């Protein structure tokens, strides 16, 4: 009976990891502070490189350490023109007249980035690194289209701390060996259409869907495509206040398609708070503060539970965003 319980627990952990192969979309809320995690085309456009760090700890009665850490770095390959600057998925400037656009003749802005993350689910640990490259192309006086491609490597590990083998338990040992240090190649494509008020995004990850994870000689599950559709609109309530309702719709064959609905209020572009309702009826409270022009700190609290409240999904996240390099940096070309 003990052995059967271990089999079931391990399999659930592995399947949970499969649903989390995209950047923390399925269970986590880091994308509220950093949309680049779920859509590599949603990069800020400025003369600085953006460095984001996050630490997330989830509460659990059964497993002591359920945690997630990531660092992301991205920036433009050449110094962009201030007229094309973009922050948090929106253009910083309003549209200009067509005559000004023709005179100015805006050029595409190339961007590169990298994400490194480490997720610990107790039974299973996941480490991945993704590289991305994209380009922002102004379409007209108001709208810009960004597209990006990302390629990454995902490594699944079975934690030795949670696997206690009985004597001569060869089948269970083979089961663990089939998953331990499983390596998966990941490819993603994304697009982001935005103006000073509207943002629409689409991303697909795990395009190498032919990759499979095996346990012994039996195929357990295949890597499936994962799609996300994003939509947001900025309401300028006054000179000081902005209100941004947004939605992310996730499409996956591994679970029921669901939407995350969020609402964020921003005061003078320096202080903001937000609420998000996600799958499993999880409520996320998000706070952020711009310490200086180059430093932003954030905090998120996820409140929720599964199994009729027996297992908590509540979590705390602390994030830090730092813009580095001088504004006078020259083009890398």
Image (tube, rainbow, N blue to C red):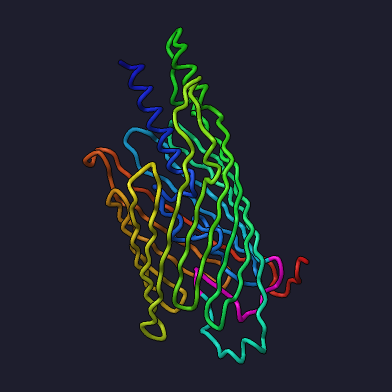
Q: Position of residue 124 (x, y in %)?
A: 46, 33
**In this view, 267 is above or below 169:** below
Q: Position of residue 106 (x, y in %)?
A: 65, 80
Residue 218 in magenta stretch = no
Along the line of sight, the residue nearer the viewer: 182 or 29: 182
Residue at the outermost top position: 168
**Magenta span covers which residues?**
77-90
Numbered-mark total:
0
Question: Which quadrant of the rendered structure holds the C terminus?
Answer: bottom right
Residue at the outermost right position: 333
Q: Position of residue 331 (x, y in %)?
A: 75, 70
Residue depicted at x 60% and y 46%: 152
For residue 333, side relative to residue 109 (left or right): right
For residue 172, side relative to residue 71 (left or right): left
Residue depicted at x 51% and y 33%: 212
**In this view, 28 is above or below 45:** above
Residue at the outermost front position: 210
Question: Which quadrant of the rendered structure holds the N terminus?
Answer: top left
Q: Position of residue 276 (x, y in %)?
A: 34, 60
Residue depicted at x 37% and y 32%: 12
**In this view, 4 is above or below 246:** above
Along the line of sight, the residue nearer the viewer: 147 or 331: 147
Residue depicted at x 57% and y 44%: 186
For residue 170, side relative to residue 71 (left or right): left
């Amino acid at each position: 009976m003990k052995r059967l319980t271990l089999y079931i627990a391990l399999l659930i952990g592995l399947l949970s990891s499969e649903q989390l192969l995209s950047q923390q979309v399925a269970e986590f809320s880091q994308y509220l502070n950093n949309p680049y995690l779920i859509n590599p085309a949603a990069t800020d456009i400025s003369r600085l490189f953006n460095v984001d760090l996050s630490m997330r700890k989830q509460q659990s009665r059964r497993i002591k350490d359920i945690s997630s850490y990531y660092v992301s770095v991205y920036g433009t390959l050449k110094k962009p023109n201030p007229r094309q600057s973009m922050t948090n998925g929106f253009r910083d400037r309003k549209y200009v007249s067509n005559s000004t656009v023709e005179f100015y003749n805006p050029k595409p802005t190339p961007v590169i980035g990298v994400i490194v993350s480490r997720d610990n689910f107790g039974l299973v640990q996941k480490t991945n690194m993704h590289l991305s490259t994209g380009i922002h192309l102004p379409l007209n006086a108001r709208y810009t289209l960004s597209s990006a491609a990302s390629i990454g490597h995902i490594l699944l590990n079975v934690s030795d701390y949670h696997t206690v083998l009985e004597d001569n338990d060869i089948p269970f040992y083979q089961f663990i060996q089939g998953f331990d240090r499983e390596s998966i190649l990941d490819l993603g494509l994304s697009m982001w259409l935005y103006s000073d008020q509207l943002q629409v995004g689409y991303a697909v990850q795990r395009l190498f869907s032919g990759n499979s994870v095996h346990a012994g000689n039996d195929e357990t599950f295949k890597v499936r495509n994962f799609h996300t559709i994003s939509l947001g609109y900025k309401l300028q309530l006054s000179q000081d206040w902005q209100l941004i309702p947004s939605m992310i719709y996730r499409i996956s064959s591994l679970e029921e398609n669901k939407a995350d609905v969020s609402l964020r209020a921003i005061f003078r572009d320096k202080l903001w708070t937000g609420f998000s309702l996600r799958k499993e009826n999880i409520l996320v409270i998000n706070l952020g503060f711009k310490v200086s022009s180059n430093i932003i700190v954030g905090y998120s609290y996820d409140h929720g539970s599964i199994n009729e409240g027996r297992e908590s999904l509540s979590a705390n996240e602390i994030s830090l965003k730092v813009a580095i390099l001088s504004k006078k940096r020259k083009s890398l070309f």
